[in-house]
Amino acid sequence: MQRTVLDLWVGVFVVAGIIALLVLALKVGNASTTFNVGETYRVYAEFDNIGGLKVRAPVKSAGVVVGRVDDVEFDTQRYVARVAIKLDKRYLFPKDTSVSILTSGLLGEQYIGLEAGGDSAMLKDGDAARITQSALVLEKLIGQFLYNKAAEGGAK
Amino acid sequence: MPERLASGLRGIGHQVVNGVWRLGYASRFFLLTLLRSPTSFRRFHLTVREIYFTGVLSLIIIIVSGLFVGMVLGLQGYETLQKYGSSEAVGTLVALSLTRELGPVVAALLFASRAGSAMTAEIGLMKATEQISAMEMMAVDPIARVIGPRFWAGVISMPLLAAMFSAVGVFGGYLITVVVIGVDAGAFWSQMQSAVDVRHDIMNGVIKSVVFGVAVTAIALFEGYDAPPTAEGVSGATTRTVVTSSLAILGLDFVLTAFMFTGI
């Protein structure tokens, strides 16, 4: 085969492959919402129980994804979970923002919800959020419910 | 009885020594291919020619298979997810299974049987008809002239083919679930986009396909180069290429998945 025709076909093939990759990245993946390194800041929060929270879980405020869970550690000094959160530089939150672990839907994945407070000072890189709320553990909730029922029955 | 035992042991020993020797020969062959690559790149049109034969001519089988795999995933996923009332998640299912596993693995299996076997047969026949020896006589390095371009053509083609497989597969899933069955298009795409991560899912898929490309072409080229120069030898080498590279793909896929997606 002539070299020009060959080159043309190979060029078409390579361009088609790169287009397929771009389609995968832009249409199928979330390239538009992935945060770049350097445009984020780290904030810490401590919880008594993180439930099923995983690294890379979304951090939402008012339902909008503003960051991701970066790291989960166990503090052996005080026996609490220490969660590092990466937040987008564009979104600043007051110092008294409350950090809670929520569940999307009844059986969905767990994510972190931020609720802004009224402080005028903003959270900076490396700060720790003071107000936190642990994950809701279904077993504990059911146990409490049963205990209350039993107590009611005993009072009668 | 002891003689029988001794001859049995000798057989096992012979097998092991042979296997290790062949592995060493294959690694030296692979290293030599990499070392002589600058020489092959100096005449890049040879590589372009091989990309045409391995990549462009594999397009049809890759695209048609991708479309059908995506459509089947859509149908099966819809059937199961519908029972739990979350049929919109079918987009996530199709996209994640394709980008993480099926895209690279099935494309590599097809590539091994479509392009790998052809490479082995071609080089085996070149050796049987003494074209390789003739090159050596003319002081042309057969590794740089024949093996190098084919190796790089395979390594370049494989990720592109896998990406096309995944993209066409997602389109096939869309076609069946959204156009034919009637799942909401907005939910289909938005759930998919929130679940598929570019670095974690798509890039890892690309890395997998590059690894498979290296494995398949290296095995195919070595089997061809090592084939006994007879009709039987070439046919046996072609069969071994398909079997060995398929096993290598599946084995490597397990190892890569264990490293990439389990978070150990």
Image: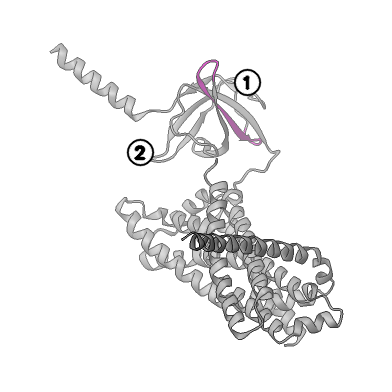
x and y, in percent, of residue B168 in the image: 53, 68
Which of B162/B71 is in front?
A: B162
| Labelled disc at residue A120 | 1
Residue type pointed to by label 2: Leu
Write down the region rendered in magenta: A76-91
N-terminal label among 2 and 1: 2
Quarter of the picture containing the C terminus of chain A is: top left
Q: Nearer the viewer, residue B57 or A109?
A: B57
Other-residue count near label 2 (Cα within 10 Å), few / some / many at <14 / 14–19 / ≥20: few
Q: Chain of mark 2?
A: A
Give SS at disc 2.
Answer: loop
Q: What residue would you read off at disc 2?
A: A106
Residue B53 is drawn in which quadrant?
A: bottom right
The residue at the point 34 percent across, 30 percent down is A138
- The crowd level at tag 1 (other Cα within 10 Å; few <14, some 14-19, many 20+) is few
Image point (65%, 68%), residue name:
B217
